[in-house]
Amino acid sequence: MSQDINIVYSKIITALLQAAKEAIPRGCRKKFRPYWSKKLELAVNYREKARRLVEKHPTPNNKTQYNRLTAKIKLLSKQTKKDNWAKKCGELNMRRDGKKAWPIISHLSGVKRRKNAEPITTSTEQITKSEQKAEAFNKHFANVNKNSHARD
């Protein structure tokens, strides 16, 4: 009798593991968008069909239809992002979910935001390439070091 229970348990466990393997995404999901919805996915599929039609038959009507669908997707994605943000902020309870609020606040403040490399302006030119920037820094610091050693 105990073997029958073990067999039943193993079948249940196997079924649960199989369901989890199929339903739970593993690893880094490519281009994950938290605001993505079925409505948006349907609009993107319609736009893809319209794009293929424009490539085969580039008539003004087909191009107009494609442009309308593109504009619709932009508006729809903007609205779903806005709704998702309002929902996320509306669900926050500072007394209970303080740990969830801090990452949002730090993200909004831009503490970890990376900036694009800015060009360096010398007396003669503006340098944008990293190798040229390194050479300019080396020349500058070499002059600084020579001047500081001369004073000593």
Image (tube, helix red, strand yellow):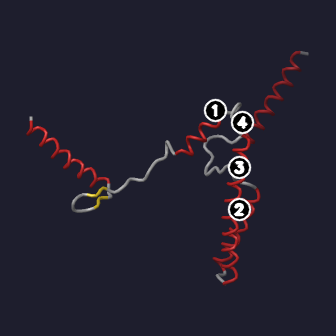
Mark number, residue 91: none
Judge the density around disc 1: few (<14), some (14-19), many (≥20) Cα neighbours within 10 Å: few
- The local crowd at label 4, few if under 14, some if 14 to 19, many if 20 or more residues have their Cα within 10 Å, is few
Q: Which residue, given by chain and number where applicable, does mark 4 sit on?
A: 93
Q: Residue at 68%, 79% (x, y): give it.
A: 64
Marks 4 and 3, how far apart in space?
Answer: 13 Å
Q: Nearer the viewer, residue 30 or 79?
A: 79
Judging from the image, what secondary structure is the residue with disc 3 in?
helix
Tell whether label 4 touches label 1 (CB within 8 Å).
no
Q: CA distance from mark 3 to mark 1?
A: 18 Å
Q: CA distance from mark 1 to mark 4?
A: 10 Å
Quickly name the residue at label 3. Answer: 86
Q: Amino acid at mark 3?
A: Ala
Q: Which mark is residue 76?
A: 2
| Local secondary structure at mark 2 | helix
The amino acid sitting under disc 4 is Asn
Task: For marks 1 and 4, give the one nearer the viewer.
Answer: 4
Residue at 76% from the left image edge and 59% from the top image edge: 39
Q: Which residue is mark 1?
A: 99
Along the horizontal axis of the image, is 10 left or right of 126? right
Residue mark closest to the camera, 2 vs 3: 3
Corner quadrant of residue 142: top left
Earlier sequence position, callout 1 versus callout 4:
4
Q: Amino acid at mark 2?
A: Leu
Which quadrant of the figure contains the C terminus?
A: top left
| Residue 10 versus residue 92 in the image, above or below | above
